[in-house]
Structure formats: structure tokens, C-alpha cells
């Protein structure tokens, strides 16, 4: 996978995360956010699903995404530094820490195993 492909995918996922967090904060139900974001990008939900997993974002689609989301031309191609955790991420970290601290060594190992299944090589 080329560097541009990876950068574009990371940036479009960051756009989706921002979109979803704003929508949820405004009271939108979680169900349907993916389809609504796809509509914002003027692509099909199927194409959005492919982009999230493996479809390459070509130049034409990259510019379309930028226009649809109000980003300047070339924005999707620029590598971004890791941003500070969002409110939702901080809430998750608080919950994870509380769960970790509330259990014994066996429980902590079980929590770690569950996370390793989701994110191998941590």
C-alpha cells in the first residue's frame, strides 16, 4: 500500500470521526451515520464501505471528498500529526481505566486479551 493511499485513508477516517462526533453531539442517532456521511461525500454507502477497508482513493475522488467536506485542495494528501484525544476517546479511556482498576490480575489479563484481539501487536 502506498504512502498516499494510507494517508488519504487516515484523513478520510478522521473526517468521518469528526462528522460522527458532531452529529452525535447534536442528537443524531448512531444508526445511519455511515450512510449520511457517504451522502455528504456524494458516494454510495457501498463505496464508503470499500474505502474504509481497502479501496484506493484516487485523485478525482480525493478532490471530491475535499470539496464535499469543505477542505482545501490537497488536504487529503497531507500527513497529519496525531491529534489530541477527542471527548469520546477520553470517555473510553476513563472507562477502560476504571475497568482495569476495578478488577484483579486475572481480570486485567482478560481485558488485555480482549483488546489484543481487536488490535494485535500492541
Image (cartoon, grey):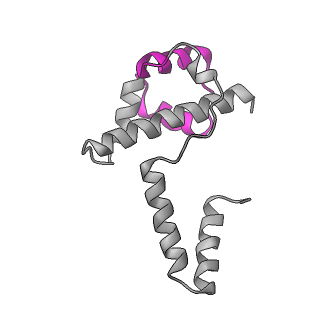
- On whether residue 50 falls in the magenta region, the answer is yes
94 or 10, which lies in front?
A: 94
Q: Quadrant of residue 8?
A: top right
Placement of 13 over or under 77, stated as above or below: below
Q: Is residue 81 left or right of residue 66?
A: right
Q: Is residue 66 above or below residue 35?
A: above
The magenta stretch spans which residues? Answer: 42-71
- At x 70% / y 60%, what residue is drawn? 120
Q: Main secondary structure of the magenta part?
A: helix
Which x, y percent locates residue 78?
64, 23
Q: Quadrant of the C terminus?
A: bottom right
Residue found at x 60% / y 65%: 115
Name the side, left or right, on which 112 lies relative to 84.
Answer: right
Q: Pick the residue in front: 83 or 115.
A: 83
Note whether residue 50 is visible: no
**Residue that extends furthest to the front in the rendered view of this protein:** 84
Residue 103 can be seen in this image: yes
Is residue 59 positioned above or below 108 on the image?
Answer: above
Expressed as whole percent of the image width and height from the top left, the position of residue 85 reads 52, 48
Q: Quadrant of residue 10?
A: top right
Tell me if 111 is positioned left or right of 24 in this view. Answer: right
Quadrant of the snapshot with the N terminus: top right
Name which residue lies at 60% across and 33% down. Answer: 9
Q: Is residue 27 magenta?
A: no
The tally of labels here is: 0
Furthest toward the left, the residue is: 27
Q: Residue at x 36, y 27 (%)?
A: 39
Please state the horizontal and vertical placement of residue 60, each as a whole percent of the image.
56, 13
Amino acid at each position: 500500500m502506498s504512502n498516499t493511499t494510507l494517508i488519504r485513508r487516515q484523513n478520510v477516517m478522521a473526517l468521518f470521526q469528526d462528522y460522527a462526533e458532531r452529529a452525535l453531539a447534536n442528537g443524531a442517532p448512531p444508526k445511519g451515520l455511515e450512510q449520511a456521511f457517504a451522502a455528504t461525500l456524494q458516494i454510495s454507502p457501498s463505496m464508503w464501505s470499500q474505502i474504509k477497508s481497502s479501496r484506493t482513493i484516487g485523485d478525482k475522488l480525493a478532490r471530491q471528498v475535499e470539496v464535499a467536506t469543505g477542505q482545501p485542495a490537497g488536504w487529503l494528501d497531507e500527513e497529519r500529526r496525531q491529534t489530541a484525544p477527542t471527548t469520546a476517546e477520553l470517555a473510553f479511556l476513563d472507562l477502560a481505566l476504571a475497568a482495569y482498576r476495578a478488577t484483579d490480575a486475572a481480570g486485567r489479563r482478560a481485558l488485555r486479551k480482549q483488546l489484543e484481539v481487536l488490535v494485535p501487536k500492541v
